[in-house]
Amino acid sequence: GNSVTQMEGPVTLSEEAFLTINCTYTATGYPSLFWYVQYPGEGLQLLLKATKADDKGSNKGFEATYRKETTSFHLEKGSVQVSDSAVYFCAQNSGGSNYKLTFGKGTLLTVNP
Amino acid sequence: GAVVSQHPSWVICKSGTSVKIECRSLDFQATTMFWYRQFPKQSLMLMATSNEGSKATYEQGVEKDKFLINHASLTLSTLTVTSAHPEDSSFYICSARDPGTAKEAFFGQGTRLTVV
């Protein structure tokens, strides 16, 4: 079945450090891939997405590239800020629906000044 | 983006009682909402798809009599955990599809349920 495996946290970085959160998936077919972010006390927000192989999603300085050959969608940011502290979830859609998602376990990121 | 509000944010209840969680779409009409559950250090797992005006569709292994879902209007879906037990303690989160932005679902802030 479909699954998502992401790097377990927590991850603690200093401000302006480089961030990578690994995510790999298993799927039948060609899912769309997503990164969601959950700031403290808030709901999940879509951070970025990619709908086909080699697509790069980007938003707020974050990037992730859909790699079919390695079934990966790693999240990167060149210089993190304290305000990036949150839980990050990698996800894929299931059964062709954009709304029915399979999530990874989430990775807690803490950025210190 | 569209706003989905979930209430309450947290609740503590006694074993054997029932708890209702509300999920509202504040600025759009949601024909479909989804309910997820997250155990500590685990993924969010889809529990059921809530369809306005019809019965919910439950995922395999989810007890429909235990987790009652009602989607009586285009802006409100409710999840009732009946006869709650400590093993039902979890984080419940809903999402709603905004037909106006066909490629995205919007999430509520989640409800932390603790059954004592």
Image: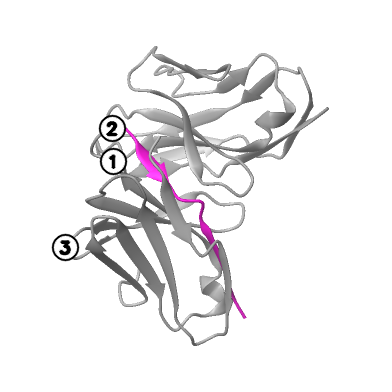
Q: What is the three-letter code of the residue carrying label 3?
A: Gly
The residues bearing labels 2 and 3 have C-alpha atoms spaced at a distance of 22 Å
Q: Nearer the viewer, residue B26 or A63?
A: B26
- Please state, as top left, top right, bottom left or bottom right, where the C terminus of chain B lies in the image: bottom right
**Residue that appears at 55% across and 85% down:** B15
**Residue that appears at 16% across and 62% down:** B53
Q: Are marks 1 and 2 in contact (CB under 8 Å)?
A: yes
Image position, residue B9 (x, y; %): 55, 61
**Residue that appears at 41% across and 44% down:** B3
A15 to B44, vertically: above or below = above
Image position, residue A39 (x, y; %): 61, 41
Tell which residue pokes out farthest to the bottom in this image: B16
B95 to B65, vertically: above or below = above
Q: What is the three-letter code of the residue carrying label 1?
A: Asp
Same chain letter for marks 1 and 2: yes
Q: What is the three-letter code of the residue carrying label 2?
A: Thr
- Please state, as top left, top right, bottom left or bottom right, where the N terminus of chain B lies in the image: top left
What segment is highlighted magenta in the picture?
B104-116
* Chain under numbered label 2: B
Nearer-N-terminus badge (3/1): 3
* Chain under numbered label 3: B
Residue at which label 2 appears: B101
Mark 1 crowd level (few <14, some 14–19, many ≥20, 10 Å Cα): many
Asked where in the image residue B104 lies, by quadrant, the reply is top left
Residue at which label 1 appears: B98
A112 to A70, vertically: above or below = below
Residue at which label 3 appears: B53
Secondary structure type for disc 3: loop
Image position, residue A113 (x, y; %): 83, 27
Secondary structure type for disc 1: loop
